[in-house]
Amino acid sequence: MDQEKDHCNTAETVRNSFESSNLYISHYASSFNSHKLDQEDVDIDEVDRKDPAIIAMEVDSQLTYLRRLKFQFVEQNAKDKYVKSIVSDIDHAPLVTDEDNKQVKLRNDERKAALTQAKSRLGEVQNDVKTLAPLVEEDYLKVKKATEKAAELRQKIIDARLALSRLRQMHLHPRLTIKTADQKLADQVVEMQEITDEIETVSQKVQEVKERLKGGALEMENLRVKRAEAEKTMKMATVDEDDSILVPLCDWFTASLALHRSMQNLEDMEIISQNEIRLQYRVDNPRTREALVTITLIFVPDSRQLASADVAGLDELGVDPGDVIDAHIQTNNVQGLISAVLSRARGGV
């Protein structure tokens, strides 16, 4: 009890000293605003302070002083609160409950999830940088070559001008007659027109070549994806080398799959098990533009009978499949099921 009384006395002393120390700046606002300088008492030094640079320096010094004063006030207030919390009754002190700990844990989990997402986005950006770096380097080399060529042409132009100046000094006036000059001008106009036509033709050919290159690059990328999928399918399949029946079937399946991909925008196909397959399509919806729809087909083991189907991604499009899935499952119509689901997903009904 004596120790608590000592703490109370110390806190009371700190409070009294704080109240007696003229730190209440807000009380002096009116007097500060009402203060005016007497013109008679103003000297030359004070008149020079009207310079904006000097006033700015004074304002900065005053702001620094006020920040220090504010820091001292906050520090003193924190000490006062700390002393009061020590000497106050523990029954009235705020307690940390399990619910507070749970809320803190939930906030920490949310921040961790946000950090994980940020890391994943950072990884994607790094992968993009790694992918685009060779392309940027290639473009840089092209631009560097073009710059060197431009510098070389500039030097050639300078040399040609110097040569022309020497020729003009060697061949004094009159160099050409009016008739010869007119004929030369006409020939140059015709030549310039022919060169312009050739430039337009070359530009068109260059544009066509660029378009063909873009189409070839896209086709090459599609072929790479198809090759990777085919290799993946071949690794998963267990086929004997001497079996000549499955090779045509594999070619037919690959061609059918490529046709299906091009017609239905099939993004990914994954074989989950011997009787389960997952198909992922990219559809264009008038409401959400592009979206992914995943159709999981489950068959009866060792048969081609469709047992059930699961469709994901229609809720985001605001589409209700209705009884379309059950009706096609009863008739064992896999193609009709996929076509009906994709039709509703694209139509948004």
Image (cartoon, grey):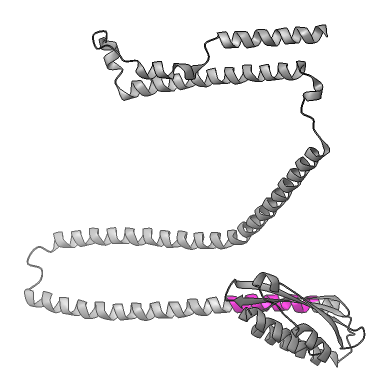
Left or right side of 11 for 45: left
Image coordinates for residue 148, horizontal then vertical, percent: 42, 59
The residue depicted at 12 percent of the width and 74 percent of the height is: 181
178 and 125: which one is in front? 125
The answer to whether 132 is drawn above or below residue 305 in the figure is: above
* Quarter of the rendering occupied by the N terminus: top right
**Residue found farthest to the front:** 92
Image coordinates for residue 346, horizontal then vertical, percent: 63, 80
The residue depicted at 66 percent of the width and 82 percent of the height is: 344
In magenta, the rendered stretch is 218-232
Using the rendered view, name the quadrant where residue 77 is placed.
Answer: top right
Residue 329 forms part of the magenta stretch: no
Left or right side of 207 for 183: left
Image coordinates for residue 192, horizontal then vertical, percent: 25, 77
Using the rendered view, name the quadrant where residue 274 is placed.
Answer: bottom right
Residue 220 forms part of the magenta stretch: yes
The residue depicted at 81 percent of the width and 78 percent of the height is: 277
Image coordinates for residue 229, horizontal then vertical, percent: 75, 77
The answer to whether 111 is drawn above or below residue 54 in the figure is: below
* Quarter of the rendering occupied by the C terminus: bottom right
The answer to whether 306 is drawn above or below residue 33 in the figure is: below
Q: How many marks?
A: 0
**Residue found farthest to the right:** 302
Left or right side of 206 for 227: right
What secondary structure is the magenta-colored segment mainly?
A: helix
82 and 311: which one is in front? 82
Left or right side of 53 for 206: right
